[in-house]
Image (spheres, helix red, strand yellow):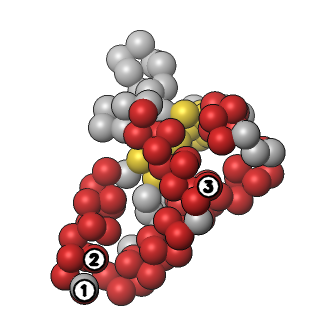
Amino acid sequence: MTQTMTKTMTTPSTFLNQALHAITDPTRRRILQSLKQRGAATSSVTPAGKHTGLCAGDIEERVHLSQSTISHHMAILTKAGLIDAVKQGQWRWYKRNEKALRRLVKSLRAQL
């Protein structure tokens, strides 16, 4: 069973504040970079049922932090809407939300 984690709708100001908070941390930027290298623009599951994102274990290996620390960072990135999380069985797969990242850049241009 696959379950997509849903995000709540936010106002433009709330989105910008949450997104900026999320990317202020260097570890979260490294996580976003790792997800970018893993084909962020593709769908999270291929026709053969294989995931194209990264699971938490993959991210742990790339940023060299504990599972609990990774979970904390992933929760912040997910709440900000910058990544999408899909739960399949006991695994949670993550990929970048490119649309939200473009929205962040657009919001910054408009605000600054």
Q: Is residue 45 above or below residue 99?
A: above
What is the number of the mark on residue 108?
2
What amino acid is labelled 3 in the image? Thr
Q: Earlier in the sequence, mark 1 or mark 3?
A: 3
Say whether residue 78 is left or right of residue 92.
left
Contact, mark 1 vs mark 2 (Cβ under 8 Å)? yes
User: What's the CA distance linking mark 1 and mark 2?
Assistant: 5 Å
Say whether residue 92 is left or right of residue 51.
right
- In the picture as drawn, the residue positioned furthest to the top comes out as 48
List the residue tagged with mark 1.
111
Return the x and y of residue 100 as percentages of the image width and height: 33, 61
What is the number of the mark on residue 40?
none
Return the x and y of residue 81 as percentages of the image width and height: 44, 62
List the residue tagged with mark 3.
27
- Number of labels in the image equals 3
- The residue depicted at 51 percent of the width and 55 percent of the height is 29
User: What's the CA distance linking mark 3 and mark 2?
Assistant: 21 Å
Q: Is there any visible trace of residue 108 in the rendered image?
A: yes
Return the x and y of residue 26 as percentages of the image width and height: 58, 59
Question: In terms of image quadrants, where is residue 20?
Answer: bottom left
What amino acid is labelled 2 in the image? Leu
**Which element type, helix, strand or loop, lies under badge 1?**
helix
Q: Is residue 103 above or below residue 92?
A: below
**Neighbour class for label 1 at 10 Å: few (<14), some, many (≥20)?**
few
Q: Earlier in the sequence, mark 3 or mark 2?
A: 3
**Which element type, helix, strand or loop, lies under badge 2?**
helix
